[in-house]
Image (tube, rainbow, N blue to C red):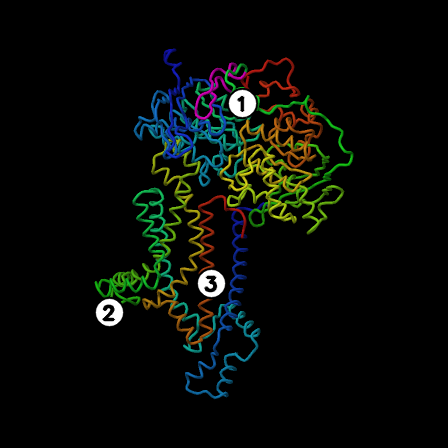
C-alpha cells in the first residue's frame, strides 16, 4: 500500500522551465520560468494562444522538442524522472510507459499504412516485460478498443486510419496512450480538429479514463470553453510566461491578470440582446431554391459508387445588409452550399437567384459580371494566398480584370489594406510576412476589392486565435454595416454564429433541420439535432450566456460529466 | 447493390484490365505503324539495291509481293489483323519470322534490364534512406554529391570508361559480348561467365537510375521523418530501428515506387545504347540493324513487344502500389 503522501506526489512537476530557441529567432526563449504541477487524478489545462509556448512545454516533457530547441534551465519531473537526464533506454520506457501523449490531428498522427490494431500492439510489445504472448496482446488490444468506446473492435482493429472518422481515430490514439496504464496523459489540443459533438465525447472519455485510473492529465488547449468543462486547475500562458494559474473557479470567475480577462471576454458568446433586427428590404438579394447536390465517389470495378448527399433541397433567402449563419458539423454540406452559390461547384438541381437573375443560367461574360458581386473568404489564410504574389497584386488583380487601371487598382488596394487595419506598405510585401490574423484581413480586403454585394465567409475565423477571432469578427461586422454587405457566414462553431448572425440555418447531411432568427434558434431550438449541437458547446454551463438554453437554476460546474 | 464475392470481384477487375490492355496494345501498334511508315526510305528500294538491280519492274514486283503497293489503310488493317492473331510477320531481310528473331533476343535484354532495375532500386533506395536519415551530416553530403555525379554522367561514356579501366587496363572483365564463345563450360561455370559479362553493362545502365532513386528516397525519408506519426512513434517509446523499419520506410517508398514504375519503360529504351556499346546480343542491336535496313516488320515487332513489356511493368507497379498503400485499393483504372 502506498502512503497518502506518496499517492499525492505530483505525477508531473515543472519547475522554472525555460526552453531556448535557436539563434536568430524573434525571441531567445520559447518558454521562460514556467512552473506548475499535475497531481494524480487531476486535469490541468495549459491555455494560451498560438506562440504561447504551450505545445513546446508538452513536447519538452517527453524530450520530443524539435532539433535546435532545448531545455535551457529548470527541471521537469515526469513520474519522478527527469527526461533530460535519462539515458536512451530509460527515456523510451518513460515515453509511452509512464507518460503517454496524444495530438491534435489524429489522422496525421497515425501511420497511414499500418492497421490501427498493429499500431496499438506495438505500444504493448515495446513496453511490457516479459513480452506477452500473441493472444494476450490481442486480448489487450480488444479490451482497450472497447474501453475507448469503439464499436465492433474485432473489425476495427483491422482497419486503416483512413477508414475511420476523426472521432474514431482520436479514440484509437487514446487507446494506444492507455495501453501501458500511464500515470500521466499529455493531450495536445486533442479535440481542436473535431466537431463539437465529437469533441464533447472525446473530452468525456478522457475524463472517465482519468477517474478510473487516477491518472493525471495535462490538457493543452486554446479554448476556454474546454477549460471550463474539464479542468481542475488552469495555467494561462502568454509569450512563454505564466500569466496566471489557479483552480478553474479562481481563474475563470475571478481572473487576476488582464490578459486572462481579455481571453475570457474574447470567447464568442451570444449577445442576443444586442442583435438589432433592422427592417430589411422586402426583395431578397439572394434566393436559393431547392438546391440539390450528390457527390458520387467512384469505388472498385462494378461496385456502386458511394453517394454523399451534400445538398438535399436547400432553400434560403438573403437580404441586403443581413448576415446568415450556416452551421453544421463536418460533412453537413455547408461548404458545398457556399461553393454552389458562387457556382464553383455545379448543383444537380435547383435555382440560385441573385438580384433577379438566375445564376445557374448565366454563361460567359454575364456570369463573370455576376461573380464579381459575390465574393468568398476561405478558412485557411495560409493556403488561400499565392505565396509568390505580392499582397497589393493579390488585391488589385480582381479590379484590374474588370478594367480598372493598374495605378488606380493599387491605390484602392492600399486604401482597403488600411481599412482592414493594416498599413499601406503591406501592399509590397509577400504573404509569409504576415500572421494568420493579418492574412485573413488581407483575404477580406481582396474579396472587398471588387465591391461585392454578397460575401461568403467559409469558416473565415476558425483557424484564428480567440482574441484575433474577435477582432476579425468585429471588422466584418463594421464592413457589413458600411458597405451594406449581405453575408453568408459558414461555421461549425455555434458560438460564433450566435455572435455575428441575424439568422441561422442548421444543416445536417445536406438538409436544413432548423432555420430562424438567431435568438429563436438559440433560445428555443426546435430540432433535436440543434439541441445536441447546443449542448455540445464547450463551456456553455460556465459562460451562462443569455439565450443559451440553460436548465433552470443549474449552477455552472466546471466538470462536464458531473 | 451488387455484392460479389471477393474472388469474383478481383477476377472481373482483372478481366476488365486485360480488355483495356488489348485496346492499348492495338492503339500502340497503329501508332508504331504510322510512325515507321512516316520515316523516309522505301524498303523495296533497299531490298532491290541489295540484290544489285534497280529496274522498275523488280521494284514493282517486290512491292506487290510484300503488299507495299496497297493503300496505307489496307496495309494497316492487315497488320492489325495479324497482330490480333499474334503473327508478327516475316522479315524479308533476314528471311525468318519476326517472332523468332525477337524472342531469341528478348531474354538477353530482359536479363540486362531487370538486373539493372533491381540493383538500381535496391542500392538506390538503401543509399537514399541512409542519406535521408543522416541528413545534414558528412555521410549525407558524400552520398548526395556521388548521386549527382552519377546522375550527370552520360550512359555511353560511363560504359566506355568502364571498358577502358576494367578490360583494357586491368583486364579483369570481358569488354563485350554475352558469354565466352568456343569453350565448353558446365552450367554453373556458364552462369558465372554470363554474370561476369553482365557486370559492366548493368553498372552503366543502372548508374543513372540508382542516382535518381537515391535522391528521391533521401527527400522522401526527410519528409516522412517530419510527419506527425513519426512523432507519435517516438512518443510511444519505440526504438530507432523500429521507427525506421516499422513506420518510415514503407511510407517513404510510396513516391519511389511511382517513379520507378514510370521509368521501367525508359530503362528498356536506355538498354539500346548500352547493348550497342557492349555488343550485347539483345533487342537493342536488333533494333539498330533493322532501322538501317528499313526492316519494317522487325521494327514493328520489336516496338510491339517492348510496349507489351512496358505495359506489364506498369501493371506490376500498380499491384505493388496497392500492396504498399491500402488507400489505393479503389478504382479499376
Asked whether the residues under the numbered discs 2 and 3 touch, taking CB atoms below 8 Å apart as contact, a structural biologist would say no
* View extreme (right): residue: A282
Q: How many marks?
A: 3
Identity of the residue drawn at 39% across and 17% down: A10
Which label belongs to residue B183? 2
Please identify, in this view, whether the residue under mark 2 or under mark 1 is nearer the observer: 1
Percent from the top left, x then y, of residue B46?
Answer: 44, 80
- Residue tagged by mark 3? B307
Asked whether the residues under the numbered discs 1 and 3 touch, taking CB atoms below 8 Å apart as contact, a structural biologist would say no
Magenta-drawn segment: A224-252
Quarter occupied by the C terminus of chain A: top right
Q: CA distance from mark 1 to mark 3?
A: 63 Å
For the residues tagged 2 and 1, is the chain the same? no
Q: Quadrant of residue A38?
A: top left
Specify whether residue A459 is in view: no
Quarter occupied by the N terminus of chain A: top left
* View extreme (left): residue: B170
Percent from the top left, x then y, of residue A102?
Answer: 45, 29
- Callout 1 secondary element: helix
Please identify, in this view, whether the residue under mark 2 or under mark 3 is nearer the observer: 3
- Callout 2 secondary element: loop
Compare residues B189 and B72 and report the one nearer the observer. Answer: B72
Of callouts 2 and 3, which one flags the residue occurring earlier in the amino acid sequence? 2
Q: CA distance from mark 2 to mark 1?
A: 87 Å
- Residue tagged by mark 1? A224
Percent from the top left, x then y, of residue A48?
Answer: 49, 25
- Callout 3 secondary element: helix
Dot 2 crowding, Cα within 10 Å, few <14, some 14–19, many 20+: few
Amino acid at each position: 500500500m502506498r502512503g497518502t503522501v506518496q499517492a499525492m506526489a505530483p505525477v508531473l512537476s515543472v519547475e522554472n522551465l525555460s526552453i531556448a530557441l535557436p539563434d536568430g529567432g524573434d525571441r531567445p526563449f520559447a518558454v521562460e520560468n514556467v512552473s506548475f504541477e499535475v497531481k494524480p487524478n487531476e486535469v490541468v489545462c495549459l491555455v494560451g494562444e498560438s506562440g504561447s509556448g504551450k505545445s513546446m512545454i508538452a513536447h519538452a516533457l517527453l524530450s520530443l522538442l524539435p532539433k535546435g530547441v532545448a531545455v535551457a534551465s529548470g527541471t521537469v519531473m515526469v513520474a519522478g524522472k527527469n527526461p533530460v537526464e535519462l539515458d536512451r533506454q530509460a527515456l523510451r520506457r518513460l515515453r509511452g510507459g509512464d507518460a503517454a501523449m496524444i495530438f491534435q490531428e489524429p489522422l496525421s498522427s497515425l501511420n497511414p499504412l499500418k492497421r490501427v490494431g498493429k499500431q496499438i500492439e506495438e505500444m504493448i510489445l515495446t513496453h511490457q516485460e516479459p513480452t506477452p504472448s500473441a493472444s494476450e496482446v490481442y486480448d489487450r488490444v480488444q479490451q482497450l478498443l472497447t474501453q475507448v468506446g469503439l464499436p465492433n473492435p474485432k473489425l476495427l482493429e483491422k482497419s486503416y486510419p483512413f477508414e475511420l472518422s476523426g472521432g474514431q481515430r482520436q479514440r484509437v490514439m487514446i487507446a494506444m496512450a492507455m495501453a501501458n496504464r500511464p500515470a500521466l496523459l499529455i493531450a495536445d489540443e486533442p479535440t481542436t480538429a473535431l466537431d463539437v459533438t465529437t469533441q464533447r465525447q472525446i473530452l468525456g472519455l478522457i475524463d472517465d479514463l482519468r477517474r478510473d485510473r487516477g491518472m493525471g492529465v495535462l490538457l493543452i488547449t486554446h479554448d476556454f470553453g474546454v477549460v471550463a468543462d474539464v479542468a481542475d486547475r488552469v495555467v494561462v500562458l502568454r509569450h512563454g510566461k505564466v500569466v496566471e494559474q489557479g483552480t478553474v473557479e479562481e481563474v475563470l470567475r475571478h481572473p487576476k491578470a488582464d490578459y486572462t480577462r481579455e481571453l475570457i471576454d474574447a470567447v464568442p458568446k451570444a449577445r442576443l440582446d444586442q442583435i438589432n433586427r433592422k427592417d430589411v428590404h422586402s426583395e431578397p438579394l439572394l434566393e436559393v431554391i431547392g438546391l440539390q447536390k450528390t457527390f458520387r465517389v467512384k469505388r472498385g470495378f462494378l461496385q456502386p459508387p458511394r453517394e454523399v448527399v451534400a445538398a438535399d433541397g436547400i432553400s434560403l433567402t438573403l437580404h441586403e445588409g443581413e448576415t446568415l449563419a450556416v452551421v453544421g458539423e463536418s460533412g453537413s454540406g455547408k461548404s458545398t452550399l457556399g461553393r454552389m452559390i458562387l457556382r464553383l461547384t455545379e448543383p444537380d438541381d435547383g435555382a440560385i437567384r441573385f438580384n433577379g437573375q438566375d445564376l445557374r443560367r448565366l454563361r460567359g461574360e454575364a456570369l463573370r459580371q455576376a461573380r464579381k458581386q459575390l465574393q468568398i473568404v476561405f478558412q485557411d489564410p495560409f493556403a488561400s494566398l499565392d505565396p509568390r504574389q505580392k499582397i497589393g497584386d493579390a488585391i488589385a488583380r480582381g479590379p484590374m480584370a474588370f478594367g480598372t487601371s493598374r495605378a488606380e487598382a493599387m491605390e484602392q488596394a492600399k486604401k482597403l489594406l488600411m481599412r482592414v487595419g493594416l498599413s499601406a506598405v503591406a501592399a509590397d510585401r509577400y504573404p509569409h510576412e504576415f500572421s494568420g490574423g493579418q492574412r485573413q484581413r488581407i483575404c477580406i480586403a481582396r474579396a472587398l476589392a471588387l465591391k461585392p454585394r454578397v460575401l461568403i465567409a467559409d469558416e473565415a475565423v476558425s483557424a484564428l486565435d480567440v482574441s484575433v477571432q474577435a477582432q476579425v469578427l468585429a471588422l466584418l461586422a463594421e464592413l457589413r454595416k458600411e458597405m451594406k454587405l449581405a453575408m453568408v457566414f459558414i461555421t461549425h462553431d455555434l458560438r460564433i454564429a450566435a455572435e455575428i448572425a441575424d439568422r441561422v440555418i442548421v444543416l445536417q447531411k445536406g438538409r436544413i433541420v432548423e432555420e430562424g432568427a438567431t435568438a429563436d434558434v438559440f433560445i428555443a431550438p426546435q430540432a433535436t439535432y440543434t439541441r445536441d449541437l447546443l449542448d455540445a458547446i464547450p463551456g456553455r454551463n460556465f459562460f451562462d450566456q443569455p439565450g443559451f438554453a440553460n436548465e433552470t437554476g443549474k449552477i455552472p460546474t466546471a466538470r462536464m460529466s458531473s | 447493390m451488387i455484392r460479389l464475392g471477393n474472388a469474383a470481384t478481383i477476377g472481373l477487375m482483372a478481366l476488365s484490365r486485360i480488355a483495356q490492355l488489348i485496346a492499348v496494345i492495338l492503339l500502340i501498334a497503329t501508332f508504331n505503324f504510322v510512325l515507321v511508315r512516316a520515316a523516309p526510305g522505301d524498303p523495296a528500294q533497299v531490298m532491290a539495291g541489295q540484290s544489285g538491280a534497280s529496274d522498275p519492274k523488280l521494284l514493282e514486283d517486290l512491292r506487290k509481293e510484300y503488299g507495299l503497293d496497297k493503300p496505307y489503310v489496307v496495309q494497316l488493317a492487315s497488320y492489325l489483323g495479324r497482330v490480333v492473331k499474334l503473327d508478327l510477320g516475316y522479315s524479308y531481310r533476314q528471311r525468318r519470322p519476326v517472332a523468332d528473331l525477337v524472342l531469341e533476343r528478348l531474354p538477353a535484354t530482359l536479363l540486362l534490364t531487370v538486373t539493372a532495375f533491381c540493383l538500381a532500386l535496391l542500392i538506390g533506395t538503401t543509399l537514399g534512406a541512409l542519406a535521408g536519415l543522416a541528413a545534414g551530416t558528412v555521410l549525407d553530403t558524400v552520398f548526395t554529391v556521388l548521386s549527382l555525379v552519377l546522375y550527370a554522367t552520360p550512359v555511353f561514356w560511363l560504359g566506355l570508361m568502364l571498358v577502358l579501366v576494367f578490360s583494357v587496363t586491368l583486364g579483369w572483365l570481358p569488354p563485350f559480348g554475352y558469354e565466352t564463345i568456343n569453350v565448353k563450360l558446365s552450367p554453373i561455370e556458364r552462369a558465372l561467365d554470363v554474370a561476369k559479362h553482365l557486370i559492366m553493362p548493368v553498372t552503366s545502365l543502372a548508374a543513372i537510375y540508382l542516382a535518381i532513386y537515391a535522391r528521391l528516397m533521401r527527400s522522401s525519408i526527410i519528409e516522412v521523418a517530419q510527419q506527425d506519426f513519426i512523432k507519435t512513434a517516438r512518443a510511444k517509446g519505440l526504438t530507432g530501428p523500429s521507427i525506421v523499419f516499422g513506420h518510415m520506410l514503407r511510407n517513404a517508398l510510396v513516391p519511389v515506387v511511382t517513379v520507378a514504375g514510370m521509368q521501367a519503360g525508359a530503362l528498356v529504351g536506355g538498354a539500346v545504347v548500352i547493348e550497342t556499346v557492349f555488343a550485347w546480343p539483345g533487342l537493342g542491336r536488333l533494333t539498330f540493324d533493322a532501322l538501317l535496313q528499313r526492316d519494317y516488320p522487325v521494327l514493328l515487332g520489336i516496338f510491339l513487344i517492348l510496349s507489351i513489356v512496358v505495359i506489364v511493368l506498369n501493371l506490376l507497379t500498380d499491384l505493388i502500389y496497392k500492396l504498399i498503400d491500402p488507400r489505393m485499393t479503389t478504382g479499376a483504372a
